[in-house]
Amino acid sequence: MKKGAVSLLLLGGILTMSLFCACSVGFTEMEAKPPHKVGKGPPPWAPAHGYRAKFRYRYYPSVQIYYDVNRGLYFYFYMGKWRCGDVLPQGLKVKGEYVVLEMETDKPYEFHAEVLKRYPPGQKKGKGKKHW
């Protein structure tokens, strides 16, 4: 009789534990997070305050050419397309003043329309380098 009672208690305990484990395995408690707010910040071609940009370019407004200082690459519009190379084709030369642009993209020409508005060719917008 003792053996039967112990077996029954043991079996009851095992069943209770297996039910508890089965129920708790599928449940995951998740923490509620506030929704991500999209605030108005600087445009994609301008660095955020305190942010270190991934790419730095010298932009020559007079010829509309970008030069990636770290990679040693020029980006220029030639024969109807934006092109990239470590040397410029004959006839294209960087001259005059430049501004320093810090961007999050490896393709500076993607924001050329905005850059062109800010630094139109032929207009002096200050002397030397500009960080923006």
Image (cartoon, grey):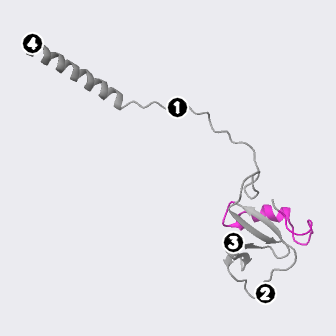
CB atoms at circles 3 and 2 under 8 Å apart? no
Q: Amino acid at mark 3?
A: Asn
Residue at the spot of label 1 = 31
Residue 34 placement: quadrant: top right
Q: Residue at x 85, y 67 (%)?
A: 129
Residue 104 placement: quadrant: bottom right
Whole-percent x, y for residue 89 in the image: 72, 85
Residue at the spot of label 4 = 2
Q: Which mark is residue 70?
A: 3
Is 119 magenta? The answer is yes
Locate the N terminus and report the quarter of the image it occupies. Answer: top left
Residue 113 placement: quadrant: bottom right
Q: Amino acid at mark 4?
A: Lys
Whole-percent x, y for residue 48 in the image: 75, 52
Which of discs 3 and 2 lies nearer the camera? The answer is 3
Residue at the spot of label 2 = 91
Secondary structure at badge 4 equals: helix
Q: Residue at x 62, y 35 (%)?
A: 35
Is 77 magenta? The answer is no
Q: Amino acid at mark 2?
A: Gly
Going from N to C along the chain, the mark reached first, 1 or 3, is 1
Going from N to C along the chain, the mark reached first, 4 or 2, is 4
Q: Tell me the magenta residue range.
A: 104-130
